[in-house]
Amino acid sequence: MSLLLNIDTATSYASVCISRNGESLAFAANQIQREHASFVHVAISDLLKTAGITITDVDAVAVTSGPGSYTGLRVGMSAAKGFCFALNKPLVCVNTLEVMAKAAINAFAIDTEDHDFMYCPMIDARRMEVFTAIYNKNLAVILQPCALLLSQISFNNILPRKSVLCTGDGANKFKSLNPDKRYVFREVQHSAADLANLAHSLFEKGQFSDAVYAAPQYYKEFFSTAKG
């Protein structure tokens, strides 16, 4: 049994939810990236009222730990760690790309049940670079999460001759390179509800992160266009 607070501010679409045993009880989202920081705590307060619980009732706090936007990751991780320290609750960290893959699997399980698809979430990381990974239908890792400079043959040495479902705001970059017909492109919006499902499994296994040392997974150095 688990009652979790789930926080995802890793990308331009932020969301939070209260979940019980992996199922969302109350959910809120924000699509204005610059407002993620002001959105999180107000949304959580509203969700607790909607769910009819207090923050002390929560068993753990889950957060997408990266990759993603630098500011977004810091917002989510700071909020999650703050709750964990204040309430003496465990922290559950889940890779953003795994959450995205889970959302794709859930969205297209019926359409792809007759095919052995791979799942390739992609997050825009500027220019022709993306944060990406590849998973099978059971979320086993085929390609470890990484920052990757895309080319038409980016994954040719990694993948067998199977169909690959590409999602995320970085997928259009790869699509523009005209990769071979193995690659299928779909729009799937992941959220804290997908995080909740994965976090529940980790909670049940007791796989927690140390809130003292937990930090966002950036996968590349910070880049700024500011002159100075």
Image (cartoon, rainbow, N blue to C red):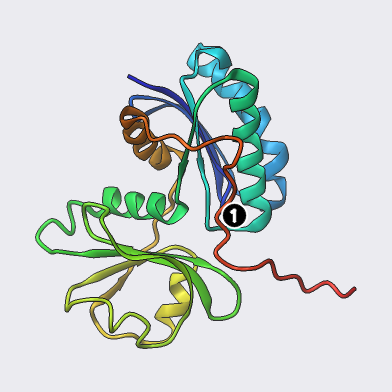
Left or right of 90 on screen, residue 193: left
137 relative position to 172: left or right: left
13 lies above or below 182: above
- Residue at figure coordinates x 31%, y 34% from the top left: 201
Residue farthest left in this picture:
114
All told, the count of numbered labels is: 1
Judged from the image, the secondary structure of the residue bearing numbered disc 1 is loop
Q: Please state if 48 lies on the left or on the right of 136 as rendered.
A: right
The correct choice, above or below, for 19 with respect to 179 in the image is: above
Residue at x 24%, y 82% (from the top left corner): 181
Residue in view at x 59 percent, y 47 percent: 215
Q: Amino acid at mark 1?
A: Ser
Q: Position of residue 27 (x, y in %)?
A: 49, 31
Screen quadrant of the N terminus: top left
Along the viewing direction, whichever of 160 and 165 lies nearer the viewer: 160
User: Residue 164: x percent and y percent?
Assistant: 26, 70
Residue designated by label 1:
12
Q: Is residue 32 visible?
A: no
* Residue sitting nearer the eye, 99 or 38: 99
Question: Which residue is pictured at 52% across the width and 48% down the height?
Answer: 65
Judge whether residue 102 can be spotted in this image: yes
Residue 8 at x, y percent in the picture: 53, 43
Q: For the residue carrying disc 1, how many other residues have a C-alpha within 10 Å: few (<14), some (14-19), or many (20+)?
A: some
Q: Please, which residue is most extreme toward the right here?
A: 228
* Residue 155 in the image, given as x and y percentages of width and height: 33, 80
Quadrant (top left, top right, bottom left, bottom right) of the C terminus? bottom right
